[in-house]
Image: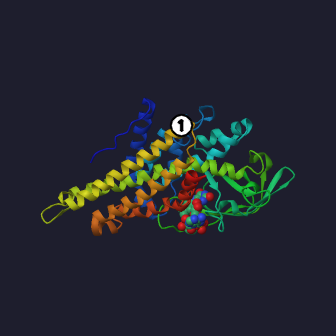
């Protein structure tokens, strides 16, 4: 099977990708199926990734980050997701959760909390969605009221990845009036009295990545944990998502690559009518289309990443990338099931898992309808 040919900007990045490929092939791919079936969250793997320097790749070295460009960080995510989406997406969610502090914290806040976050000692969660406000995130209702040196928080954040396992939670809360301008961002610690993770959702796929509602019942978060100023929370949340959507894009390409690899291997081994099914033109054209889509998706996320790395506005391109890469993952995973025939539909092969995993990527961090809204606005406003 042909390996992915990567162009990397420096030899350090080459070594990082080699290390990641090794971890993926030896630690992730072999365990994913079993732990997914048991819906077990592999917390210790994130500690291993932290020790390997993979939990804070795109952030400043000053605070323990890897100082890598997004172009490199995203290819690491792609490799991890090829082996196990729950891990690749977990690194992406953690990296997203470090962004509000890294980009908007004071020097004192960063010095106190960022090194443990970037080193992977502490695992992060990002809490924007609520039961009644998903795509319309600015309608969130969880309220935080200043009381002395604390904010007292009441409400519930829904769909929190790592909910119940995270060590810190970026809470987008309402401190002011309605709409985006009334929202603030608090960096709450797990174990805060009144911050209560609920039992995990029972999901179609990616079951090893816990998703839970976090109830907030008079939770007192110290005011020193407010990031930036009151009213800046929505701006912070959206800026974080621009980078997060590139992360989802790379995760999607990892799943698509895994599905393609599975289909190619199977097609060269399976025989029908006395020959390899790969030698039927009808099937090899399907594989050719799958491979072409994966390459195009990879090229798009890398081009968006280079825009970000060069300091240029990249929000619309990140939305295009999220839309195209996740739709590609869904198409390629569906076609991989088709290539395997009946064997694609049973759990003995990973093709059905890739299909279940690809689906969620079209929903998280802004559905693909929301991405089209972002792209459309960038064209016409
Ligand atoms: C596994 C998983 C993990 C998640 N992790 C997190 C997390 O860590 N943190 C977090 O904050 N959130 C998280 N989410 C929530 C996710 O971001 C939301 O599910 C998503 O934004 C959609 O919101 P919703 O589910 O409320 O759907 P809705 O917003 O109710 O949308 C329902 C449908 O209507 C469509 N729609 C809505 N508005 C429009 C419009 N204006 N135009 C066209 N179509 C529209 C949507 O595209 C969708 O198809 C997670 C979700 C899942 C499933």
Instruction: Let me know if residue 170 appears in the view.
Output: yes
Name the residue located 33 percent from the left edge and 55 percent from the top edge.
Answer: 290
Q: Is mark 1 within 8 Å of ligand 1?
A: no
Q: Report the colour scheme.
A: rainbow
Circle 1: is it few (<14), some (14-19), or many (20+) Cα within 10 Å? some
Q: Nearer the viewer, residue 150 or 141?
A: 141
- x and y, in percent, of residue 80 in the image: 44, 48
Instruction: Let me know if residue 187 appears in the view.
Output: no
Residue 9 position (above or below residue 176): above
Q: Nearer the viewer, residue 14 or 294?
A: 294
Name the residue located 75 percent from the left edge and 54 percent from the top edge.
Answer: 181
Q: Residue furthest left?
A: 274
- x and y, in percent, of residue 359 in the image: 46, 63
- Residue 175 is drawn in which quadrant? bottom right
Q: Residue furthest front?
A: 380
Name the residue located 42 percent from the left edge and 51 percent from the top edge.
Answer: 253
Q: Is residue 158 left or right of residue 328?
A: right
- x and y, in percent, of residue 235 in the image: 68, 50
- Residue 126 is drawn in which quadrant? bottom right
Q: Secondary structure at mark 1?
A: helix
- x and y, in percent, of residue 204 in the image: 48, 67
- Count how many numbered circles sit on residues in the image: 1
Q: Is residue 233 left or right of residue 207?
A: right
Question: In what quadrant does ligand 1 lie?
Answer: bottom right
Q: Is residue 373 left or right of residue 251?
A: right
Q: Residue furthest right?
A: 148
Q: Is residue 236 left or right of residue 68?
A: right
From the image, tell me which residue sits under label 1.
309
Q: Nearer the viewer, residue 264 or 313?
A: 313
Name the residue located 56 percent from the left edge and 60 percent from the top edge.
Answer: 370
């Amino acid at each position: 099977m042909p390996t992915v040919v990567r162009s990397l900007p420096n030899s350090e990045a080459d070594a990082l990708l080699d290390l990641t490929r090794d971890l993926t092939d030896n630690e992730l791919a072999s365990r994913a199926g079993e732990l997914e079936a048991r819906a077990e969250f592999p917390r210790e793997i994130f500690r291993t990734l932290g020790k390997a320097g993979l939990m804070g790749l795109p952030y400043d070295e000053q605070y323990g980050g890897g100082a890598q460009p997004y172009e490199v960080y995203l290819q690491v995510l792609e490799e991890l997701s090829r082996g196990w989406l729950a891990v690749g997406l977990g690194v992406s969610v953690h990296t997203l959760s470090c962004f509000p502090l890294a980009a908007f914290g004071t020097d004192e806040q960063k010095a106190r909390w960022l090194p443990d976050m970037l080193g992977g000692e502490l695992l992060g969660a990002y809490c924007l969605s609520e039961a009644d406000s998903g795509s319309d995130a600015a309608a969130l209702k969880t309220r935080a009221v200043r009381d002395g040196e604390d904010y007292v928080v009441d409400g519930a954040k829904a769909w929190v990845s790592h909910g119940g396992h995270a060590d810190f939670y970026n809470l987008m809360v309402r401190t002011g009036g309605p709409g985006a301008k009334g929202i603030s961002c608090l960096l709450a610690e797990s174990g805060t009295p009144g911050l209560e993770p609920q039992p995990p959702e029972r999901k179609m796929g990616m079951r090893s990545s816990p998703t839970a509602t976090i109830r907030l019942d008079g939770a007192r978060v110290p005011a020193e944990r407010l990031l930036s100023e009151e009213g800046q929370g929505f701006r912070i949340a959206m800026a974080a998502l621009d980078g997060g959507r590139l992360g989802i894009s790379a995760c999607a390409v990892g799943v698509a690559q895994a599905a393609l690899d599975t289909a190619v291997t199977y097609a060269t081994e399976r025989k029908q009518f006395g020959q390899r099914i790969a030698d039927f033109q009808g099937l090899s054209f399907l594989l050719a289309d799958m491979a072409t889509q994966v390459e195009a998706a990879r090229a798009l996320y890398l081009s968006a990443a280079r825009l970000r790395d060069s300091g240029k506005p990249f929000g619309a391109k990140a939305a295009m990338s999220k839309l195209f890469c996740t739709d590609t993952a869904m198409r390629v995973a569906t076609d991989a099931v088709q290539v395997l025939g009946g064997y694609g539909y049973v759990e003995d092969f990973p093709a059905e898992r890739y299909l279940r995993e690809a689906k969620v990527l079209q929903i998280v961090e802004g559905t693909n309808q929301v991405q089209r809204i972002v792209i459309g606005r960038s064209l016409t406003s």
